[in-house]
Structures are given as structure tokens and as C-alpha cells.
Amino acid sequence: MTHADIDIDYILALTHQAGEAIMEVYKKDFTVEYKDDRSPLTAADKLSNKIIIDGLLKKYPGSNIISEENKQIPYEERKDWSSFWLIDPIDGTKEFIKKNGEFTVNIALVENGVPTLGFVYAPALGLMYYGIKDKGSFKETKNGPEKLKPCEPYMECTTIRVVGSRSHMSEETMNFVKDLELKGKSIEFISSGSSLKLCMVADGVADVYPRFGPTMEWDTGAAHAVALYAGKQVINAHTGQPLVYNKENLLNPSFIVG
């Protein structure tokens, strides 16, 4: 299965469906469980996960799927996958619990380690981004899809808008900002939650997103595609090489989007 085989409208509708189900939970009081790694889990995570996986398997039977909420698939079983779906049913569960709206539904198709399709939906904000290899990245608006236009590399900006996490701010991130200042750059700092940060760089709302805290592949896959096909790079902060997916350890290295 390749990105050319995928019905984009079907996946957009599925992403919307998951988002609408999440919002039904969001509007009410809900309980929070905690997984073994102490990360939070709500009924909305489980509901979104079920809607997405059921929808993908209905349309594309036999698909390979990695999701945050599913049992981890051994590397020996998945290492030879040429393509698979990578899902985070809610990225930003902490933001969901705080009810600040900055959480997203994330669906990506990964081929040979590279996200070739990515759908990122923030239902509380009414924001949908999606990226398609060979076609570009788009933001859904009231007037239909609007193609994201590539903007200048962040080091060419006099004032650099750095987007960072509401829930995670590391010393390395602060050092990254100080290094930019030493190079004569003025810094404007923007806070946001979830995978929206990568989409903000893709959309030209921010210039760079340095991430030195831990993330997993499902946290970034969909938004990586949005950034990539909007003309941005998502690179390993230490090697300068592009982020790759379906590693033996699904933990991402530190990375920079810009």
C-alpha cells in the first residue's frame, strides 16, 4: 500500500469523526486513568483509537497499524513492513484534561520509514492540517483546502518565532534559544500544545520548533508529513539527518522543525 492508493477524503472524514467523538467526551466531566508510564488516559483516547482503527481496517483490510493505545508490536514482526499506519488518537491528553483546546487527532501513513501522508485535526479549535507526498500540505478553511506556502528558513529571519511546549520546557531548549540570540537573532516565543507545534511551523505561524524532550513516533508522524510537504525539515537535533520511523525503539531523538 502506498500513499497513491489512499482515498484522502475518506481519511479526512475519519479524522473528523474521531474528533467529533472526542468533543462529546470533552464537553462533559470525565475520569482520568494513568498508564504504567504515568501518562494520562481518558475515555476519549480509547474511543478515538477504536473509531480510527475500525475505519482504517474497514477501508484497507489487513493494514499494518501502530497506535499509542495498542499493545506494542514486537520489532521482529514489524521490521520488514514497507508501509503502516501510525496513529495517536489524542496527542496532548494533558491539554485535553486542562480543557485548553490544544490537542489533536493524528493519522499518518509511513512508507519505508518516511511519513507520506499526515492528518492532524484539532477539533476544539476547528483546525485541520494534512500533508500529501508529491502534492503539498494544506489547511482546511471555511472556503475549502488552502495550500501552505513554503516560507524562508528560520536562520534567514531577523526575528525568529520559536514555538515550544506548554507542558514541557527543557534546559536544552533554552540553550537553543540562547544560541540564536548569540547569533544576533531576536526571539519571539510562542507556546502551544501537542503536534500543533509542527503544523504552526508548516503554516508559517512559527519559524522553528526545537524539541529536546521525549516524544514517540506516533506523537510526530502525522505532523511531520504536514511540515515536510510544506517545504520544512524535521531533523535529528544531533545528527542533522531526517527523522525516521519504525525504529526498534519507537522513541524519537531530539529534533528541530524548521
Image (spheres, helix red, strand yellow):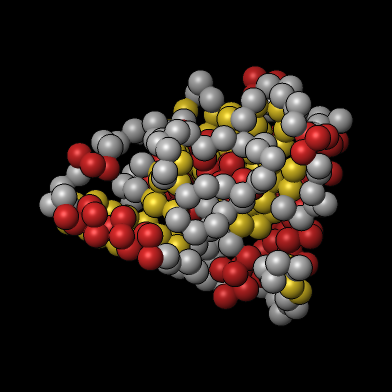
Q: Residue furthest left?
A: 184
Give residue 14's quadrant in the image: top right
**Whether residue 145 can be seen here:** no
Give residue 55's quadrant in the image: top right
Q: Nearer the viewer, residue 125 or 4?
A: 4
Give the percent coordinates (x, y) of residue 59: 81, 32
- Residue positioned 81% across, 42% down in the render: 74
**Relative to 29, residue 135 above or below:** above
Give the percent coordinates (x, y) of residue 98: 57, 75
**Whether residue 27 can be seen here:** yes
Q: Nearer the viewer, residue 141 or 52?
A: 52
**Relative to 212, residue 42 above or below:** below
Give the percent coordinates (x, y) of residue 196: 49, 53
Give the percent coordinates (x, y) of residue 193: 49, 62
**Relative to 157, residue 25 above or below:** below
Q: Using residue 15 as the reference point, say whether residue 183 is left or right of it.
A: left
- Residue positioned 75% across, 78% down in the render: 31
How many marks on residues? Answer: 0
Q: Nearer the viewer, residue 124 or 113?
A: 113
Q: Using residue 255 as the reference point, say whether residue 47 is left or right of it.
A: right
- Residue positioned 34% across, 33% down in the render: 150
Q: Nearer the viewer, residue 91 or 126?
A: 91
**Relative to 201, residue 22 above or below:** below
Quadrant including the C terminus? top left
Quadrant including the N terminus? top right
- Residue positioned 77% across, 38% down in the render: 75
